[in-house]
């Protein structure tokens, strides 16, 4: 039995009762985070453009656009809800692969669950299985795949969305294998588009493509049963190196899902240790930004590769600039959604301070680690962050995750509705996605 067929069988066999309590709990945390970051993007330009396009195209009324009572087709809902959840670059991250797993997987599961009337337990199982499949497939080719320039959230996320859809549909192993093949042929996403609207579009595209794969496979659409491992299959074509054994290793006994981290800041995850450091300096010294003479950052090599934009011109580009993150953090004492608007990036005070920030690579540092040195006219200070806030070794607590959710959602929906959404997710096994999405739309 090949890798694709083995994965399909493993996914088909996994039941809700097989999920450890910790995995069920982590899955709910992923859903809470997905809801929060998605709802917070409901009025963003990227969302509005895509919503207008979808509504013009029309579709069978099967699932809600997140945060509204507008029904669209399940595939359309997966597309826009997946895009919304990555607009702020605030969604969860598997740090070993840099996959944002929830943004492609949960929208596919949620849309299909609403349409099919799936139970809460079935939906939790679908999300958990889909995320686990996406992460293991991503691990099989990373970091070489990512280093080539592929946006792994899109390229691996489509598999997770397909598997999640298959679990909702209760597909057999052969149909799951066909769906994996259909997902492989739709796998796409390039890192060139970071800092543009295309980046959040990629997980939306993965969500809708994966959902389509599950539905077509259920109708008998055929594909290669060696989609992942064949000499001209997904791994061989998209990566110079692969480790197919990690896809099935200890399946059902260990879960990569438990290594998914939740972001405290809406920017590229490799900026987070630097942000932690500068906010610590701001708290310790409270320096006058105009009195700062220089700021030197010591960072992991990946930081400058991904977030080395020295002079970002838009809020989206600011998310991939450690220079902007440091400058705005020191001036404003916080790094949230409002620090990544076009206006914030163009703030003259931020621009002046940004020019005083320099960075150098240290191969001795881990990706979640950074050192910041600040020099003022009459003092200097150094902060060493060993484990960034929100990382696997310094995770956000349930309370901190709820605070993040409420901070994003309450301004949009009000405290009562936001609190109700939290209650529904924590008790999702006794509810369903239809009720959850209805509550998000204001339909009780």
Image (cartoon, rainbow, N blue to C red):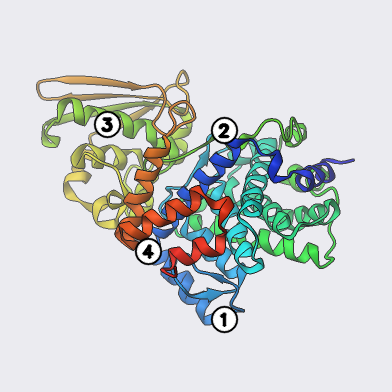
Disc 4: which residue: 44
Q: Earlier in the sequence, mark 3 or mark 1?
A: 1
The residue lying at 45 percent from left, 64 percent from top is: 439
Disc 1 vs disc 2: Cβ atoms closer than 8 Å?
Answer: no
First in sequence, mark 4 or 3: give its number. 4
Label placed on residue 278? 3
Q: Secondary structure at mark 2?
A: loop
Mark 3 vs mark 1, foreground winner is 1
Give the percent coordinates (x, y) of residue 158.
Answer: 65, 53
Answer whether labels 3 and 2 touch (C-beta < 8 Å). Answer: no
The residue where tag 2 is placed is 96
Query: Number of numbered discs present?
Result: 4
Crowding around mark 4 (Cα neighbors within 10 Å: few <14, some 14 to 19, many 20+) is: few
What whole-number distance in Å separates the C-alpha atoms at marks 3 and 2?
24 Å
Q: Are marks 3 and 1 in contact (CB under 8 Å)?
A: no
Q: Which residue is at 43% across, 51% downward?
A: 422
Distance between mark 1 and mark 2 Cα atoms: 39 Å
Label 2 crowd (10 A; few <14 / some 14-19 / many >=20)? some
Whether label 1 touches label 4, CB < 8 Å: no
Left or right position of 95 against 362: right
- Residue beneath disc 1: 58
Query: Quarter of the image holding residue 96?
Result: top right
Q: Is residue 372 left or right of residue 393?
A: left
Task: Give the spatial CA distance, label 4 vs label 3.
Answer: 28 Å
């Amino acid at each position: 039995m090949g890798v694709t067929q083995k994965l399909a069988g493993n996914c088909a066999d996994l039941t809700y009762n097989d999920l450890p309590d910790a995995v069920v709990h982590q899955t709910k945390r992923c859903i809470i985070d997905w809801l929060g970051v998605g709802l917070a993007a409901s009025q963003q330009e990227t969302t509005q453009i895509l919503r207008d396009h979808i509504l013009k195209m029309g579709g069978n009324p099967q699932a809600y656009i997140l945060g509204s009572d507008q029904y669209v087709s399940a595939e359309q809902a997966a597309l826009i809800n997946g895009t919304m959840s990555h607009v702020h670059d605030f969604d969860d991250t598997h740090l070993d692969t840099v996959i944002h797993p929830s943004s492609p997987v949960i929208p596919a599961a949620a849309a299909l669950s609403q349409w099919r009337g799936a139970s809460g337990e079935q939906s939790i199982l679908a999300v958990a299985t889909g995320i686990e499949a996406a992460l293991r497939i991503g691990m099989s080719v990373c970091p070489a795949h990512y280093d080539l320039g592929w946006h792994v959230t899109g390229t691996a996320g489509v598999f997770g969305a397909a598997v999640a859809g298959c679990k909702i549909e209760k597909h057999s192993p052969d149909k799951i294998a066909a769906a994996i093949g259909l997902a492989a042929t739709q796998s796409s996403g390039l890192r060139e588009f970071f800092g543009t609207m295309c980046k959040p579009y990629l997980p939306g595209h993965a969500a809708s493509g994966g959902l389509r794969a599950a539905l077509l496979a259920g109708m008998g659409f055929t594909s290669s049963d060696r989609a992942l491992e064949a000499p001209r299959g997904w791994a061989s074509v998209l990566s110079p190196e692969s480790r197919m054994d990690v896809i099935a290793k200890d399946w059902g006994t260990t879960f990569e899902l438990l290594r998914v981290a939740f972001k405290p800041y809406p920017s590229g995850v490799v900026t987070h240790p630097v942000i932690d450091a500068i906010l610590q300096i701001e708290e310790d010294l409270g320096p006058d930004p105009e009195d700062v003479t220089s700021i030197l950052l010591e960072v992991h090599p990946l930081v400058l590769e991904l977030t080395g934009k020295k002079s970002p011109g838009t809020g989206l580009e600011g998310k991939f600039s450690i220079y902007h993150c440091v400058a705005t953090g020191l001036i404003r004492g916080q790094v949230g959604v409002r620090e990544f608007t076009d206006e914030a990036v163009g703030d003259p005070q931020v621009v002046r301070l940004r020019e005083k920030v320099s960075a150098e690579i240290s191969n001795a540092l881990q990706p979640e680690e950074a050192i910041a040195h600040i020099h003022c006219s009459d003092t200097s200070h150094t902060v060493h962050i060993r484990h960034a806030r929100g990382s696997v070794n310094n995770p956000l607590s349930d309370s901190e995750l709820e605070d993040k959710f409420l901070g994003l959602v309450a301004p949009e929906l009000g405290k009562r509705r936001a609190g109700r959404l939290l209650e529904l997710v924590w008790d999702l096994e006794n509810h369903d996605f239809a009720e959850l999405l209805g509550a998000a739309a204001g339909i009780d």
